[in-house]
Amino acid sequence: MRTAEKTSSAESVIKNVENYDLVILGGGTGSTLAAWTFASEGKRVAVIDRKYIGGSCPNIACLPSKNIIHSAKVASYFDRSKEFGIASRGFTIDMSGVRKRKRKMVSGLNEVYLESYKKTGGMFLRGNGRFVAPKTVEVTLPDGTVRQVHGTNVIVSTGTRAAIEAIPGLVEAKPLTHIEALELDEVPQHLLVIGGGYVGIELSQAMRRFGSKVTVIDRNQRLMGKEDQDVCDALRNLLEDEGIDVHLNAQIKRISGKSGQTVRIMIEQNGPEKVIAGSHVLVAAGRAPNTEGLGLELAGVERTDRGYIKVNERLQTTAHGVWAIGEVAGSPQFTHISVDDFRVVHANLNGSDRVTTGRQVPYCLFTDPEVARIGLNETEAQAQGVPYRLFKIPMEANLRALTLSETRGFLKALVEAKSDRVLGFTAFGVAAGEIMSAVQVAMIAELPYTALRDAVLTHPTLVEGLIPLFSSAPSVHGVVSMTSTTAA
């Protein structure tokens, strides 16, 4: 993509504009690190965000949701107390207490973030920002004051929001998104979840463990449909074993009622129509970019046909001196990718040539147990015609998992057929994200799988399970042929 080199003369004629080396529109994690880093390097930096210090991750998304999910994990331990030889007389869930714990964490993080702004010299402005000219942002503060800031460079990082589809009656039902779900002070009597992706699955399990009846409705044939069949099946079995109703291949026809009172969803599933009634409805069916109302056209910043900001591999937009990072730039929707996007822009603004192409994208679904993956899975390897050897063992082969009574799941790895290079790793099990990270480091270092197999790892730890994994015989079904079939 060609980056626009010409800037409008309007930049030089706007009066009463505050000038900065860097203006950042949107205060997400990548933006926050950019502000602190550039400011500590002596640059004048201004960050504008409508509401949140540090953006979504520490306030309404990643960290608060994991906080709530851990409270649900504790509830599950109470429910399983007899299994551990502990007599329990029952327990109750105080959602206001769950929320209080989450809010305390968020408040503490906000204080830390503000202190970091103070130490580095970056300026944080809470207000609505929009472009009014190339590289010039108008900020309306909560008290109505209007300021204009101009940056030698500008980074846009306004993120995404929960997508509300054009389903008849959905808007009128005033559904929960993840933001409102994490602020509930009561356990929903019956939560209807629209969407079987990350947010839908994580919150479904958490709310079920708090005592809510939960129904998941998804239009696709499988939960987490981009994963291998064994992962999708394992997740569905997990939810159903915990008493969650799962309706797949279900098309929502219309919704009536109001969330928090009574909601009725009519679905068409494999032909027949039926109605599912509940007390609350949660929308978790994808994300939409926050690009409306930003005045991007006044800055020369173009969008894709899906509404995301158009960038090249260096994260440059179509406007000279304007960059975009994170989800609004169409990057994978993970905080750690937003952080790496910042690194790309930071390097390029400091004279290097860094790109986003070819980087690793690890992820973890924080169900209990977790699902984590790095690199290729079997579905992708077969689609790309990549020959591979498949190593796979059940979690019950992990001795640490046995001590924890957390033996559900499996580990599996793909190794290149003609070498010992690890192509990908998937874990469905306790602390899957932590186990995955060990494999990822080996992949970064380009170590053969035998280095993990022959390593001296602490006993008993969950990561030690990589030794039996890579010591197992690779599946005979898999493998050295591009037309081979996946092992069951």
Image (cartoon, grey):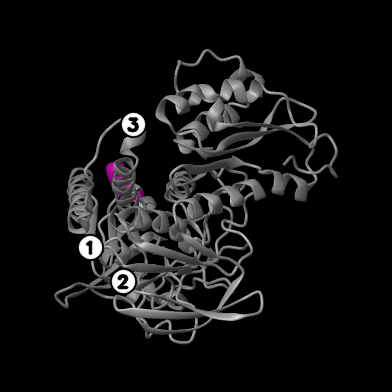
Q: Is 146 positioned to the left or the right of 424 in the image?
A: left
Q: CA distance from mark 2 to mark 3?
A: 54 Å
Q: Which residue is mark 2?
A: 129
What residue span does the magenta drawing correspond to? Answer: 34-41
Residue 35 forms part of the magenta stretch? yes
Q: Residue type at mark 3?
A: Phe
Rendering quarter of residue 378: top right
User: Who's the residue at 72% across and 41% down the image?
Assistant: 488
Q: Are marks 1 and 3 in contact (CB under 8 Å)?
A: no
The image position of residue 330, as x and y in percent, is 53, 61
Q: Is residue 296 above or below residue 324?
A: below
Q: Are marks 1 and 2 in contact (CB under 8 Å)?
A: yes
Q: Residues within 10 Å of mark 1 (few under 14, many from 20)?
A: many
Q: Which residue is mark 1?
A: 125
Q: Earlier in the sequence, mark 1 or mark 3?
A: 3
Q: Earlier in the sequence, mark 2 or mark 3?
A: 3
Q: Main secondary structure of the magenta part?
A: helix
The image position of residue 164, as x and y in percent, is 45, 76
The answer, for residue 324, to whether it is visible in the render is: no
Q: Is residue 224 above or below residue 428?
A: below
